[in-house]
Image: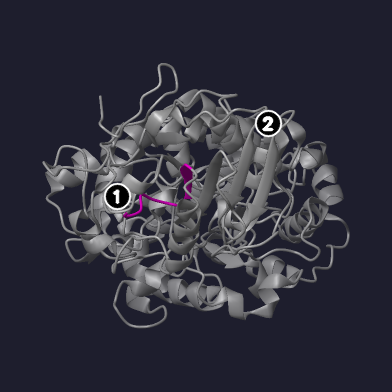
């Protein structure tokens, strides 16, 4: 979701001051428990929804269709305007940014919602796209592209469960994940959010929905999942973010729809609409794709949410307009993310309903879908943070799972003369590169801040630390970021290089996909020593390395592994055998973009390629 303004707003980085409702809403809810049919958990959800809707005012209903950003809303606003949802944008966190602070913030917001006459709890949404990545200290898992390389849907489901526990421990009950896009052009800055370039791979990884939501939505640590971004955002012309996907309906259905169908079959609770267009028509206003195809043909019974100010783009003019609002709602959008302009959205929607341009039936359908998920989540019975899960944030168990995922995601692309695996004992290893000892670099975008950043931004194990941890008796490990100081006495040099963190928009690279000058200089310094060079590439997509590859003894695609860099070292030393397979086709040059399996272009490495150590393979020729 676009967050261009949030890094400028100090309010986004401060805890919103929220005064608990008086009397405490939880006590009020308990005192009147089961006093009315909608408050009776023994009744069917549909019965409870119908009873509640019969008691709701027009303002209650419009509020349920509205989501505000935490930095632009107060407790009084939530109560007065009956707001149904709040979110944290990327990097928008309480201060201090700790799990307990998040839980306290959530409970204060939730108490404000429960203080309304009908006591309808709110949903709180975050982009926990590779772990609970807005929270300092959370376990940061590999971004989706790395998980796609594991080819392990069961592992991905376990990751979803771990993320749900950490998210639940901070009170949050709604995750804007998974991204089920099919990335068809590596120039796109969201490529790393995709599990892979073929529809089969993201479809298989839809198991993460089950991990997040659990067997039932009202189970322990159940978090509402969101399939995004519907539909075709990975297929835009030129890989331009929020661009235009120019395909026939047959190709759109064949390439981009299957992962969403898989998510719907798994009962995904919400679907987020893409900023992009299909053959020039904005998805946020596309009634055929939202209502006819998603809700009708696929039978999606959850609710549809817009992206951040996504409806504002429908008419092509800045800001939200009456045309934007009625077009989006009539197309089938149920809940609108209007982060700062939520008051205006409510006013516009009210006017459209009063004028008959949005029917009451459409409003009631949207509210029914939203309330159904709130009841199914058990929010009416358990609205506040389950503090039993707070200690799971960054737990040893979850970090061990992330380490396993990192190791399984490594793809060995070249291994000349069997330079890998490295000997643990009696070795002399030189490590260099910008990404070798930097948690921020190896985690990428959507980590603590929206775009991510280099540096020691959250606890974890860097790749260098992992190498040092694994080195055994008689092995020395020397590190120099630039490579200076290496000489011919070393047995191997490891260059850990790649991309500086980025997220959507800023991550688009239409002008080329090569390594930057600093990385190339580091590798050149290592090569000049005559020592065999192993390149570990930390990146959110394949990079243009074909011209340099002949001078490297080995190449490992590490993707964006997150906080557990030990998993990279596990594969470098052979503690874990490499099993990762390319989730995307690796170009032989940037001019080949877009390049995908089956398009007739000759790649450097094909989709699905990946070497193993046993038996050793010492060239780059696919089997």
Q: Secondary structure at mark 2?
A: helix
Look at the picture and state if 475 lies above or below 433.
above
Visible residue check, residue 496 = yes
Q: Which residues are magenta?
A: 532-544
Q: Is residue 541 magenta?
A: yes
Q: Name the residue carrying label 1.
A: 291
Camera-nearest residue between 441 and 64: 441
Of the two numbered discs 2 and 1 in the rendering, the one whose residue sits closer to the viewer: 2
- At 58% from the left and 74% from the top, the residue drawn is 6
Q: Is residue 202 left or right of residue 474?
A: left
Which of the 4 quarters of the picture holds residue 433?
bottom right
For the point 78% across and 51% down, the residue is 99
Residue 144 point in image, percent of width and height: 46, 43
Please tell me which residue lies in front, 607 or 314. Answer: 607
Gap in angstroms between the C-alphas marked 2 and 1: 42 Å
Q: With respect to residue 351, does 611 lie above or below?
A: above
Is residue 108 one of those drawn in magenta? Answer: no
Residue on which disc 2 sits: 400
Which residue is painted at 50% across and 74% down in the image? 4
């Amino acid at each position: 979701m676009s967050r261009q303004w949030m890094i400028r707003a100090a309010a986004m980085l401060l805890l919103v001051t929220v005064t608990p409702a008086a009397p405490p809403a939880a006590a009020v809810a308990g005192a009147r428990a089961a006093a009315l049919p909608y408050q009776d958990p023994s009744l069917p959800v549909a019965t409870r929804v119908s009873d509640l809707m019969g008691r709701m005012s027009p303002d209650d209903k419009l509020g349920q269709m509205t989501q505000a950003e935490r930095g632009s809303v107060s407790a009084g606003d939530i109560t007065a305007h009956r707001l149904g949802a709040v979110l944290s944008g990327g990097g928008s966190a309480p201060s201090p940014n700790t799990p307990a602070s998040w839980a306290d913030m959530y409970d204060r917001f939730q108490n404000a919602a429960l203080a309304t006459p009908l006591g309808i709890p709110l949903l709180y949404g975050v982009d926990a796209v590779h772990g609970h990545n807005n929270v300092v200290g959370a376990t940061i898992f590999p971004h989706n592209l790395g998980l796609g390389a594991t080819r392990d849907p069961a592992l991905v489901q376990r990751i979803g469960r771990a993320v749900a526990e950490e998210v639940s421990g901070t009170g949050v009950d709604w995750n804007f994940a998974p991204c089920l896009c099919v990335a068809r052009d590596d120039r796109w800055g969201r490529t790393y959010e995709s599990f892979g370039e073929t529809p089969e791979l993201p479809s298989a990884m839809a198991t993460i929905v089950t991990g997040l939501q659990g067997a039932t939505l009202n189970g322990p640590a159940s978090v509402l999942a969101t399939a995004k971004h519907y539909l075709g955002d990975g297929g835009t012309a030129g890989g331009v973010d929020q661009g235009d996907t120019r395909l026939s309906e047959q190709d759109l259905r064949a390439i981009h729809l299957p992962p969403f169908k898989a998510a719907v079959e798994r009962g995904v609770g919400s679907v987020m609409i893409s900023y992009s267009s299909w053959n020039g028509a904005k998805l946020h206003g596309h009634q055929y794709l939202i209502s006819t195809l998603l809700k009708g043909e696929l039978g999606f019974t959850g609710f549809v949410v817009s992206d951040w100010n996504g409806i504002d783009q429908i008419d092509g003019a800045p800001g939200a307009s009456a045309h934007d609002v009625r077009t989006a709602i009539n197309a089938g959008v149920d809940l609108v993310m209007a982060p700062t302009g939520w008051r205006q959205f409510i006013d516009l929607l009210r006017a459209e309903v009063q004028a008959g341009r949005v029917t009451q039936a459409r409003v009631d359908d949207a509210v029914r879908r939203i309330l159904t998920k709130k009841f199914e989540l058990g929010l009416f019975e358990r609205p506040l943070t389950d503090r039993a899960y707070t200690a799971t944030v960054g737990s040893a168990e979850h970090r061990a799972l992330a380490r396993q995922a990192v190791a399984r995601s490594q793809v060995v692309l070249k291994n000349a003369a069997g330079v890998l695996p490295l000997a643990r004992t009696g070795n002399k290893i030189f490590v260099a590169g910008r990404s070798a000892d930097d948690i921020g670099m190896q985690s990428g975008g959507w980590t603590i801040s929206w775009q991510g950043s280099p540096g020691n931004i959250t606890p974890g194990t860097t790749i260098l630390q992992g190498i040092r941890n694994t080195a055994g008796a008689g092995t020395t490990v020397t590190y120099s970021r630039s490579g200076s100081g290496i000489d011919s006495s070393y047995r191997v040099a490891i260059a850990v290089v790649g991309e500086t963190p980025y997220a959507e928009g800023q991550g688009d690279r239409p002008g080329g996909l090569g390594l930057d000058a600093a990385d190339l200089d580091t590798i050149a310094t290592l090569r000049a020593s005559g020592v065999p060079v192993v390149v570990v590439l930390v990146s959110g997509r394949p990079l243009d390395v074909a011209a340099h590859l002949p001078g490297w003894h080995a190449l490992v695609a590490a993707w964006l592994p997150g906080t557990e860099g030990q998993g990279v070292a596990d594969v470098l030393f052979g503690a874990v055998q490499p099993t990762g397979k390319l989730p995307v086709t690796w170009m032989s040059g940037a001019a080949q973009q877009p390049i995908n399996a089956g398009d007739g272009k000759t790649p450097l490495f094909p989709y699905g390629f990946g070497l193993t150590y046993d038996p050793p393979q010492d060239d780059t020729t696919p089997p």
